[in-house]
Amino acid sequence: MKKFNNFNFYIKMKKIYFIIILLFPLISFSQGYKIEVEIEGIENDTLILGYYMKDQKFVKDSIVLDKNGKGVFKGEEKLFKGLYWLYNKKTFVDLLITENQVFSLKTKSKKPIENMSVKNSHQNEIFYKYSEFSFSKRKESQEIRKKYKDAKTKSDTTAIVESLKKINQEVEDYQKNILKENKNTFLNTFVKGTIAPEMPEVSAEQKEKNPFFQYIEYKKHFWDNINFSDVGILRTPFFYNKIVYFMDKVVQQRIDSMEFIIRDINELVKKAQADSNVFRFVLPVVLTHYEKSDKMGLDRMKVNLYETFYLSGQVPWADDEMLKKMKERSLRLKPNFIGNIAPDIKVVEYDCDLPNYIRHECEPISLLQIKAKYTILLFWTTDCSHCRTEVPKINEVYKELKKENIDVVVFSLSTMNPELNDDNTVNEEKTLKKREKWLNFIQKKDLYDWINVYDLYHFSNYRDLYDISSTPVIYLLDEKKEIIAKRIGHDVIKDFIHFLEKKDKTIK
């Protein structure tokens, strides 16, 4: 009896094993994707599957549909969630890629959304119904708006406005129903992400108390409808653009508001930490945006991002080399932030000859000891062709300001380096000629009203203190030697000083 039972058990196990073998291809395939497509009107032609990322479209896969317009996109690895698209020269249509990646779509090349039939993807089914509804309401709204310019009476205008309000309400109700019935889905993330956050009504009293109340509330609720914990948000056409819009249009842009800009941007990046992949996307996007920006004063933001996230150990993908460069960059930028007192540099004037300079026998002049309401701090060299063009123009601006009785000086530091021999020793003869070239330029361009200084061997460490790697570079300092502008052109100096003079008179 026992032997018989064992035999029965053996037979049962063989059957189970056989079933597992049969099912194994299906089980393993479920880890990938399989999207069956049938499009009437596209036969024996290529169909491309792609996705949205940042403000671009990328191709993921392509197939050739058969004579019946049928084909299958498939792969062993799952696709990343997001909004994808199907493209052929005859049609274009979006689709959702969610957790379930085995489904089928059937439609026509003309009006693909209206003719869409979906199997085994509830989220796509709802998505296409929503898309069709939104399109019809948008079309209806456009037709009503056309009547607005032809409205003859106030009642006509009121009727049009009420009709538009009704359409907006219908769309909002439709969206709310989708969100309610499809919680914890990518469909929910996508639809909600396209909705502008609700803003509270602002009373006259609130406006009077705080004219910026509405702006503050708008900024406060800007990210309310974005699900940072859903990685699918990365592959949408709106997420990246929303980040850029926030940085360029929503947060304050004034130099004197840097602490608020930093606070708002840090809050955005911290929200992105809800998902490691979202964080890995958002932080570099933000950093690159500010690294490429030519707006004055935003170097403080770069250093903030370096120190707050990268150098604090919160960025696992950053290697030692990247962190080393960020640390070095921070050290060069921090001393010369706008708003800082300019780092002092003690250098010798043009009439100190080279031997005395090397022996430290000339009395150095200190930048911070210069008495003037405005100091134009200029770094340049005669080896730089752009400098040779720019310096005379700076002198013209300087003379114009002096004619206006504005108290301004130019602290002009030559960034020339010593000439070296093949063994890296100083070639004194060539170095003397280089210095002579500089002195001749001063004489030729009549720059003797300036404070002309040099520091061949970088005793003052000016390159690190002022982040000088190329020339010309102009800093503008106020009476307290606070940095009020940096890396500006000659054409900005006068306007900037005029603005400050006008502001000063207004305060007085």
Image: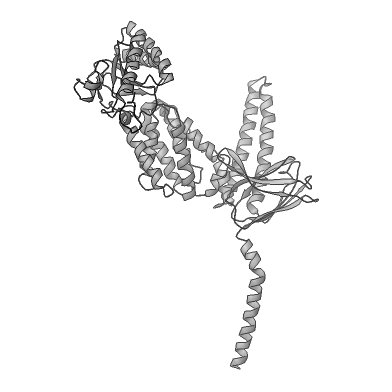
Q: Residue furthest bottom?
A: 1
Residue 125 seen anywhere in this rendered image of the structure:
yes
Along the line of sight, the residue nearer the viewer: 104 or 328: 328
Residue 298 screen position, x and y as percent: 40, 31
In-image side of 459 versus 470 (left or right):
left
Residue at figure coordinates x 49%, y 44% from the top left: 281
Q: Residue furthest right?
A: 67
Above or below, 501 against 79 in this view is above
Residue at figure coordinates x 66%, y 78% from the top left: 15
Locate residue 156: give its quadrant. Answer: top right
Q: Quadrant of the C terminus?
A: top left
Residue 339 screen position, x and y as percent: 31, 27
Residue at figure coordinates x 66%, y 24% from the top left: 148
In-image side of 135 versus 427 (left or right):
right
Residue 275 seen anywhere in this rendered image of the structure:
no
Residue at figure coordinates x 35%, y 38% from the top left: 328
Q: Quadrant of the N terminus?
A: bottom right
Locate residue 190: give its quadrant. Answer: top right
Colour setting: one colour
Locate residue 141: give its quadrant. Answer: top right
Residue 442 screen position, x and y as percent: 33, 12
Above or below, 296 against 309 in this view is above
Along the line of sight, the residue nearer the viewer: 490 or 210: 490
Residue 342 screen position, x and y as percent: 28, 25
Along the line of sight, the residue nearer the viewer: 422 or 311: 422
Total marks drawn?
A: 0
